């Protein structure tokens, strides 16, 4: 027996045809993120890599992934951030410690410092310029900002503006220090809100986001509720510690979704630039 087609059924199917168009954008976007072997992400290659002592190269992060650098205060986390950034412009081992950041020539780098006073920030960026091979010159691709005087809400608003303004031209975003983007590192609401923004920034821009944070005392775990949440969400993490009885910093790839980078050590030379340490001997290149 055939079913009679009435006006109500016609209207129903007509409504279904434009159903997707009337969904909220976040529901429409879900379809675009369905896995298919025939539809890989536009750029699935490793953007950040690290060369191990045996010469083998290990992937650290692809586009849109989050990397954390963490350790006690003054463990030289900012030096690692500088080495990673400089590796977009230089392949010298003395400058990069073996990191390799593969950005396109037109991709931009946002470097945000929330801790240092303007004087120390300037000195740090001058070192970075020299490490990149731009001594005495501005680097057009690097947009570095000192954010120390601002409240965490103002910093978040400033970052939102940069992200919306520069969009997918951003290839790398460095945040030194992540804890300064929340009011309280032990407030779960603040932590979750920041994780949401990091997820949005990384997905909206496709940039690799690299952040630093301190660890709890006598621990190798990132500090506070914020640290716990970042540990769950990050794609890769490097733990830094000053070695007892020496000036060296040891870097351990503690957390990774993929293959681990071999533990390595480095020091600073008399000018404050990084020096790779092999067999407990600083190596000058």
Image (cartoon, rainbow, N blue to C red):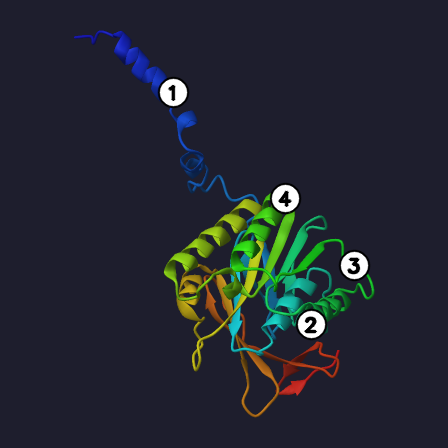
Q: Nearer the viewer, mark 2 or mark 3?
A: 2
Label 1 neighbourhood size at 10 Å, few (<14), some (14-19), many (20+)? Answer: few
Q: Earlier in the sequence, mark 1 or mark 3?
A: 1
Instruction: Check whether the beta carbons of the residues at disc 1 and disc 2 lie within 8 A of each other.
Output: no
Q: Nearer the viewer, mark 2 or mark 4?
A: 2
Among all residues in the image, which is located at the extreme left?
1
x and y percent of residue 216 in the render?
44, 76
Q: How far apart are the two marked residues, 1 and 4, measured between alpha carbons?
A: 35 Å
Q: Earlier in the sequence, mark 3 or mark 4?
A: 3
Instruction: Check whether the beta carbons of the residues at disc 3 and disc 4 lie within 8 A of each other.
Output: no
* Residue named by callout 4: 165
* Residue named by callout 3: 138
* Residue named by callout 2: 120
Q: Earlier in the sequence, mark 1 or mark 2?
A: 1
Q: Quadrant of residue 123?
A: bottom right
* Residue named by callout 1: 17
Instruction: Check whether the beta carbons of the residues at disc 1 and disc 4 lie within 8 A of each other.
Output: no
Q: How far apart are the two marked residues, 2 and 3, measured between alpha carbons?
A: 17 Å
Q: How far apart are the two marked residues, 3 and 4, measured between alpha carbons?
A: 21 Å
Q: Quadrant of residue 36?
A: top left
Q: Compared with residue 180, is residue 143 higher up or lower down, i.e. above or below? A: above
In the rendered image, the quadrant that contains the C terminus is: bottom right
Label 2 neighbourhood size at 10 Å, few (<14), some (14-19), many (20+)? Answer: few
Along the horizontal axis of the image, is 5 left or right of 257? Answer: left
Q: Earlier in the sequence, mark 2 or mark 3?
A: 2
Secondary structure at numbered mark 3: loop
Q: Earlier in the sequence, mark 2 or mark 4?
A: 2
x and y percent of residue 121 in the render?
68, 68
Residue at image point 27% right, 13% down: 9
């Amino acid at each position: 027996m055939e079913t009679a087609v009435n006006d109500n059924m016609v209207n129903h199917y007509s409504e279904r045809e434009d159903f997707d168009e009337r969904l909220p954008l976040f529901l429409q976007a879900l379809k675009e993120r369905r896995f298919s072997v025939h539809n890989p992400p536009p750029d699935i290659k490793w953007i950040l890599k690290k060369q191990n002592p045996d010469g083998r190269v290990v992937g650290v992060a692809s586009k849109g992934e989050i990397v954390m650098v963490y350790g006690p205060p003054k463990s030289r986390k900012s030096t690692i951030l500088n080495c990673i950034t400089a590796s977009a412009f230089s392949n010298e081992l003395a400058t990069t410690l073996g990191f390799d950041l593969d950005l396109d020539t037109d991709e931009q780098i946002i470097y945000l410092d929330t801790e240092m006073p303007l004087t120390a920030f300037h000195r740090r960026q001058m070192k970075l310029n020299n490490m990149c091979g731009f001594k005495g010159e501005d680097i057009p691709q690097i947009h570095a900002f000192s954010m120390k005087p601002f409240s965490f809400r103002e910093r978040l608003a400033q970052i939102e503006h940069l992200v919306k303004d520069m969009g997918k031209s951003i290839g790398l975003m460095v945040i030194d220090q992540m804890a300064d983007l929340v009011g309280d590192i032990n407030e779960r609401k603040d932590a979750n809100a920041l994780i949401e923004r990091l997820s949005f920034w990384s997905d909206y821009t496709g940039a690799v986001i690299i952040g630093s944070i301190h660890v709890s005392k006598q621990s190798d775990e990132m500090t506070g509720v914020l640290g716990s949440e970042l540990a769950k969400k990050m794609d890769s993490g490097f733990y830094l510690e000053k070695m007892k009885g020496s000036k060296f910093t040891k870097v351990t790839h503690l957390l990774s979704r993929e293959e681990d980078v071999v533990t390595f050590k480095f020091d600073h030379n008399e000018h404050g630039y990084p020096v790779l340490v092999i067999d407990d001997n600083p190596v000058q290149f």
